[in-house]
Image: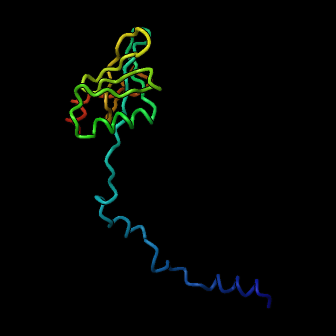
Amino acid sequence: MSSVQSQQEQLSQSDPSPSPNSCSSFELIDMDAGSLYEPVSPHWFYCKIIDSKETWIPFNSEDSQQLEEAYSSGKDCNGRVVPTDGGRYDVHLGERMRYAVYWDELASEVRRCTWFYKGDKDNKYVPYSESFSQVLE
């Protein structure tokens, strides 16, 4: 008998029960769900008026992370300025406003976002206000 045939026979005769180290689906259900929870990571958005309609645009990941770090630092946000978009805009954290640095442009509102909604006529999700998001949480 060849070694391949003997290996195949051993596999077909092996015990189909799971190994003692594997988790059954029932064991997974019994796990503490609290250990699986991860808090939502906020993302920062700014509002731009396009065709006389508010459009919420996300900051890139790096800028959003810098804004979140400045917000979470425990220091007073009033007077705190975070440069974004390669230094072309400054976000005044306490005011929640974004200002162009090198040219004249209307200031735009900034939000720290964790909750979103989509209206009947909207094709994108819109962030809830920060105060309403706190109520939801």
Task: Please give the name of the residue rendered at 42% of the width and 67% of the height, measured from the top-left corner.
Answer: 25
Looking at the image, which is closer to me, 75 or 19? 75
Residue 82 point in image, percent of width and height: 35, 28
| Total numbered circles | 0
Q: Residue furthest right?
A: 2
Residue 126 point in image, percent of width and height: 36, 26
- Asked if residue 64 is positioned above or below residue 100 in the image, the reply reads below
Query: Is 57 situated left or right of 93 in this image?
Result: right
Residue 96 point in image, percent of width and height: 28, 24
Looking at the image, which is closer to me, 128 or 121? 128
Q: How is the image coloured?
A: rainbow
- Asked if residue 72 is positioned above or below residue 44 in the image, the reply reads below
Task: Please give the name of the residue rendered at 37% of the width and 70% of the height, measured from the top-left corner.
Answer: 27
Residue 4 point in image, percent of width and height: 76, 83
Residue 12 quadrant: bottom right
- Asked if residue 130 is positioned above or below residue 20 in the image, the reply reads above
Task: Please give the name of the residue rendered at 54% of the width and 80% of the height, measured from the top-left corner.
Answer: 16
**Quarter of the image with the N terminus in it:** bottom right
Residue 52 quadrant: top left
**Quarter of the image with the C terminus in it:** top left
Residue 36 quadrant: bottom left
Looking at the image, which is closer to me, 79 or 41? 79
